[in-house]
Image: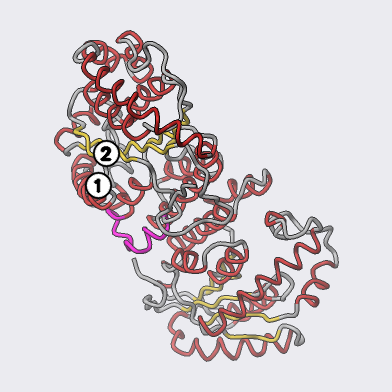
């Protein structure tokens, strides 16, 4: 079993991180389009998307029987399944893999839920180090105003209501996201994360992202497929 | 106030003080007779007035069914499987085992983290990673390891369940032949168990003995572990179920087991009973003292 940083694959792995409302999903969707158009073999993988644990995660959330530990482990199971069956083989084959959320999401959320920092980091130590990890930095108020438009309210775990920080979903969400931001900020130097100012216009952010990605794809030209 | 320990990490919200119950683990590879013994031990403990919760792998409300379904498909990666098992274990630990310990139950568990460690290690996962994964487990009061060699295990498996895909380590692709694969895999697994037995100080029981003898050895070991615990005053005769009761219980597991249990049930019973009851009397003042201290 290889550990974080030990992997040497011909493929490239780009991941986006940030709190809800940071605009990271929009950015990676635009990047995906562009890479396809440029003729790269691109695969997109989303957090919490493996069919293996989809049903039990849904049921666990609905019945509210998930604890911080099982919440963490069920997401780690999902992640491990996507890694073993999908992402690692693709990276070996030389693909460009894009991930909307990666291990840093788990580090931030699980620690915000009270799990031990070292335990969670070791749990995900099998994950390959991304070629570039982008963090979309945004003030909490900006993110909240973006996501409260057109939404009826926060879900139980999303708002961190399981932590009992506040009975009010909005207030709970704010407190929980505040903790998550603090964890992200700590990871920036620790994991050499690339910070993007997520208050800039969408186009400006995308220009930055493409420049950085392009520089890292210079060696991956042989992986191009016909557009 | 006594405090329980884990193997390193503590999950949020888990209060480790004031857990007066006991965790008794029965470990051993597939086909070694763990469930037969648990079927005998549970009523034996209950006859002594002890409340028992029995639990085992893949029995969690959250993940049990999911693991079983996923294993049907034979496509689980080894890291994924280990983490999935940890999910199942965490759910049972937090929502079943700990509450039972808090209420003073004896938790009789069919395997614990050791089987999971052995399976992961034989699949060559990083030992540091594997130990960290299960490090939130509460240390049990005793681990009884039913030990068997591959040569003795093979006929049992052949004539009961047959070779199972995962228990034969077919995911490791050591051999196309299920028998060959089973032999290789179980040899490796048993070697891991032997190492764990030393590291975690299992009480080793020779699983090639007859069911009745193993049951007697387990009863002695368990009595020793749970003595001194506040308990219901013994009635006249509660130390040992009658042969009829044992065969009744064993019948649940299998008719062949019942016959075996009944044939061996009356041998040497009086000696054991005498020894145990004298121990019990000696332990009484301790139990009272602990109760008073609360």
Vertical order, B232 against A39 (above or below): above
Residue B191 at least partly seen: yes
Is residue A169 within the magenta segment?
no
Magenta span: helix, strand or loop, mainly?
helix
User: Residue A60: percent from the left, percent from the top?
Assistant: 62, 46
Residue B54 at least partly seen: no
Observer-nearest residue: A192 or B260? B260
Observer-nearest residue: B18 or A162? B18
Asked whether the residues under marks 2 and 1 belong to the same chain, the reply is yes
Query: Dividing the picture into quarters, in which one does residue B234 lie?
Result: top left
Q: Which residue is mark 1?
A: B197
Residue sitting at 21 percent across and 23 percent down?
B213
Observer-nearest residue: A136 or B177? A136
Q: Which residue is mark 2?
A: B145
Residue sitting at 47 percent across and 64 percent down?
A119
Q: Point out the residue furthest to the left here.
A: B151
Q: Which portion, as a residue range, is magenta?
A: B121-134
Observer-nearest residue: B246 or A25? B246
Residue sitting at 43 percent across and 37 percent down?
B22
B170 sits to left or right of B55: left
């Amino acid at each position: 079993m290889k550990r974080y940083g030990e992997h040497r694959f011909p493929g490239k792995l780009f991941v986006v991180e940030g709190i809800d409302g940071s605009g990271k999903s929009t950015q990676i969707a635009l990047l995906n389009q562009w890479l396809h158009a440029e003729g790269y073999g691109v695969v997109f993988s989303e957090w919490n998307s493996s069919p293996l644990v989809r049903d039990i995660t849904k049921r666990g959330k609905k019945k509210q029987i998930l604890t911080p530990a099982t919440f963490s482990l069920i997401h780690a199971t999902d992640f491990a399944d996507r890694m073993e069956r999908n992402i690692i083989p693709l990276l070996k084959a030389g693909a460009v893999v894009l991930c909307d959320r990666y291990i840093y999401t788990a580090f931030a959320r699980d620690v915000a839920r009270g799990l031990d920092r070292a335990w969670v980091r070791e749990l995900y130590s099998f994950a390959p180090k991304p070629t570039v990890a982008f963090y979309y930095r945004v003030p909490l108020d900006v993110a909240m105003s973006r996501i409260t438009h057109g939404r009826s309210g926060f879900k139980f775990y999303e708002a961190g209501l399981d932590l009992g920080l506040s009975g009010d979903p909005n207030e709970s969400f704010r407190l929980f996201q505040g903790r998550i931001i603090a964890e992200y900020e700590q990871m920036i130097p620790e994991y050499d994360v690339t910070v993007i100012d997520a208050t800039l216009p969408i186009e400006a952010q995308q220009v930055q992202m493409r420049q950085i990605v392009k520089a890292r794809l210079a060696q991956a030209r042989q992986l191009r497929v016909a557009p | 106030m006594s405090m329980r320990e884990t193997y390193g990490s503590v999950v949020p919200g888990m209060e480790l003080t004031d857990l007066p119950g006991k965790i008794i683990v029965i470990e051993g590879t597939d086909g070694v007779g763990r469930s037969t013994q648990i079927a005998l031990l549970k009523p034996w403990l209950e006859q002594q007035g002890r409340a028992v919760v029995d639990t085992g792998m893949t029995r969690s409300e959250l993940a049990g069914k999911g693991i079983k379904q996923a294993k049907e498909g034979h496509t689980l990666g080894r890291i994924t499987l280990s983490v999935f098992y940890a999910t199942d274990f965490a759910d049972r630990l937090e929502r079943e085992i700990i509450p039972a310990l808090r209420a003073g139950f004896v938790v009789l568990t069919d395997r614990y983290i050791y089987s999971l460690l052995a399976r992961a290690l034989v699949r060559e996962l990083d030992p540091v990673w594997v130990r960290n994964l299960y490090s939130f487990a509460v240390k049990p009061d005793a681990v009884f390891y039913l030990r068997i060699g591959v040569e003795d295990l093979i006929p049992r498996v052949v004539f009961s369940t047959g070779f199972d895909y995962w228990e034969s380590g077919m995911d490791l692709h050591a051999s196309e032949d299920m028998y060959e694969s089973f032999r290789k895999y179980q040899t490796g697994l048993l070697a891991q168990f032997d190492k764990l037995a030393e590291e975690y100080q299992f009480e080793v029981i020779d699983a090639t003995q007859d069911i009745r003898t193993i049951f007697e050895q387990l009863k002695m070991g368990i009595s020793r572990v749970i003595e001194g615990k506040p308990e219901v005053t013994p009635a006249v005769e509660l130390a040992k179920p009658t042969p009829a009761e044992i065969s009744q219980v064993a019948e649940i597991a299998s008719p062949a087991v019942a016959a075996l249990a009944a044939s061996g049930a009356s041998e040497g019973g009086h000696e054991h009973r005498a020894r145990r009851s004298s121990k019990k009397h000696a332990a009484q003042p301790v139990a009272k003292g602990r109760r008073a201290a609360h």
